[in-house]
Amino acid sequence: MALEINEDKSQIIADIRSIVQDVRDLPTLPTVAIEVRRLVDDQTSSISNIVAVVEQDMALTGRILRISNSAYYGIPRKVDNLKMAMVILGVREIVNLVTSVSVMHMFLQQDLKEDFNIKEFWLHCATCAELTVGLYEGMKLVMPSSAYIAGLLHDIGKMLLFQYFPEYHEACVNYASENKVRIVDAEVKLLGIDHGHVGSWLAKRWNIPEDITEAIAQHHIRPPNSPANGLPAIVDWADRLFYLMKSKKADDTVEALKSSTKWNEWFKDKSISTEKMVEILAKRWERSSELIRLLD
């Protein structure tokens, strides 16, 4: 599809925003995930309150226990109930697991067109979530509780464009291929907006916390004063590293990063070597593949 490039993209943006905000058959964030995050933010709630909510969904409970007992965590003893899992893994980890498992399983069951590989899409998202956490850990930065979920949901706008605006999606893919530019550059050129902002509108509809919504919106395009180590920037690097690591061996990834001007400018003051960082990220990558396998 050839999409005419006009200077004024306001109508395209308005149409996309209207669909995301108003269409009733858009996917909704699972109720359990919403309630669990609310309880975590409530200082009067307890582990028992969270467990009681999750256990209302028997299928979700089964998936979480299956993952808890898998190589994904490598716990040496059998975890046979949610409370035990929460004590061993921690509340934050269980919240991330509830959100990721419920959201990914919901989308993996959707009947999308054959030319959209839903499993590959969520493998990318789950890996970026792990790489986001790995970057925080490697650089010994204070990691916000929202880091994993921001990485997991960063590309949700791509799925929305594909599913509800296939003509726009196809035009952007073709433009990016023909002009050898990133898909985000093609989106801004043709639509006047990128998939990050589209995804952030869905996140707001889901009442996702503001810092996650901001990271989704800004993981490619950020204001000039955006912090170099802010969550949007970390998610952006996780996304870049996914594509770099996907096509290279560890040693080649290290060399590619060392020769990257952008990486050197961003990474110059960090208290960890590039070699060690790539080692941490490689271990994180393995976890995401295991998670997708367990949800299959």
Image: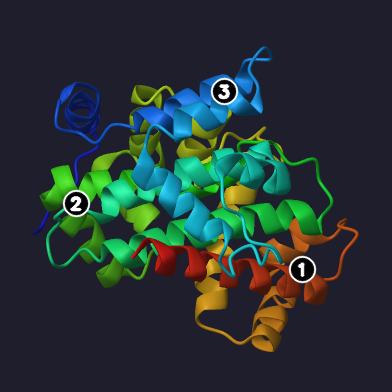
Q: CA distance from mark 2 to mark 3?
A: 31 Å
> Which class describes the residues within 10 Å of circle 1: few (<14), some (14-19), or many (20+)?
some
Q: Nearer the viewer, residue 57 or 34?
A: 57
**Helix, strand or loop status at disc 1:** helix
Q: Which of the numbered marks, if any, corresponds to residue 49? A: 3
- Percent of width and height locating residue 124: 44, 63
Q: Quadrant of the C terminus?
A: bottom left
Which residue shows up at 21% across the image and 65% down it? Answer: 174
Q: Quadrant of residue 57?
A: top left
Q: Where is residue 238? Give x, y as percent.
A: 59, 58
Q: Distance between the Cα atoms at labels 3 and 1?
A: 38 Å
Above or below 94: residue 130 = below
- The quadrant the N terminus occupies is bottom left
Q: Mark 3 and mark 2 in contact (Cβ < 8 Å)? A: no
Where residue 22 sits, quadrant-wise, is top left
Q: Secondary structure at mark 3?
A: helix
